[in-house]
Image: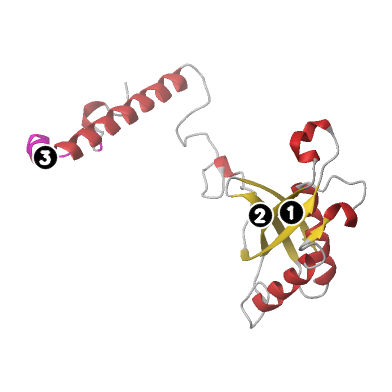
Amino acid sequence: GSRCSAGRCPFLLPPRFPSVQKKHPKMFSVRLSLGLVIAGLLAACEAGNTAGARPCSPQGAAPLSRAGIRGTPMRLRGGHQSGYSLGIRDSMMIAHSFKGEEFGPAQGMHGATYTVDVEFSADKLAERLNWVMDIGVAMDVLKKVLQPYNLKNLDEIFPGENTTTEFMCRKVFEGLSAELQGKFAGSVNVKLWESHSAWASFTGDIK
């Protein structure tokens, strides 16, 4: 039988449920519905266990962890399983055009204003300072890296290249990597927003 048999489902109905139903009908309805759903899932799991399917219960299965499913760690921020991060933001305005009929009207010269988000990630904080890196240095370096592209025609800077958002994410990362040698070691994620609903990113490590 189900694990919810013999009154072993305390989440199904609260104690003295008639009075609860009368005083708090909405809470009663939600709790009853949730209890029935969970009871159904548990019954299905138990039926699957009986039929020899992979068990739904912790018995015989690897333990779950907050980091992932069945003990498999979840990968975060470009390879770091856990750690610290620092984010900064800037922007740049550019002009460019694309080559290839796949780009449609964007083959013509047009402008774009990118919001540039950069996230620095590290396994541990700097000794004594307790930071990922100096936020002032990070913001100055980002501004310096963006300066050659800001208010420029990217067709002239990268002749023959389609300077897509993805392409520019990599270029910004390369600039940051060159500037931060000896100043930061860890993972860096560069995200360029084309609009409030579209973005691209590139993640790499600085050693």
Residue tagged by mark 1?
203
With respect to residue 166, does 207 lie above or below? below
Type of amino acid under label 1: Thr
The residue furthest right is 160
Q: Quadrant of the C terminus?
A: bottom right
Residue 15, given in percent of the width and then of the height, sits at 14, 39
Alpha carbon distance from label 2 to label 1: 8 Å
* Horizontal side, residue 58 vs residue 178: left or right: left
Residue tagged by mark 2?
77
Give the mark toward the camera: 2 or 3: 2
Q: Earlier in the sequence, mark 1 or mark 3?
A: 3
Marks 1/3 in contact by CB < 8 Å: the verdict is no
Type of amino acid under label 2: Arg
**Relative depth, front residue between 122 and 15:** 122
Residue 18 seen from this side: yes
With respect to residue 84, does 63 lie above or below? above
Residue 150, given in percent of the width and then of the height, sits at 76, 63
**Relative depth, front residue between 107 and 118:** 107
Give the mark toward the camera: 1 or 3: 1
Residue tagged by mark 3?
20
Tell me which segment is drawn in magenta: 11-22
Other-residue count near label 3 (Cα within 10 Å), few / some / many at <14 / 14–19 / ≥20: some
Type of amino acid under label 3: Val
Residue 43, given in percent of the width and then of the height, sits at 36, 23
Q: Secondary structure at mark 1?
A: strand
Marks 2/1 in contact by CB < 8 Å: the verdict is yes
Other-residue count near label 1 (Cα within 10 Å), few / some / many at <14 / 14–19 / ≥20: some
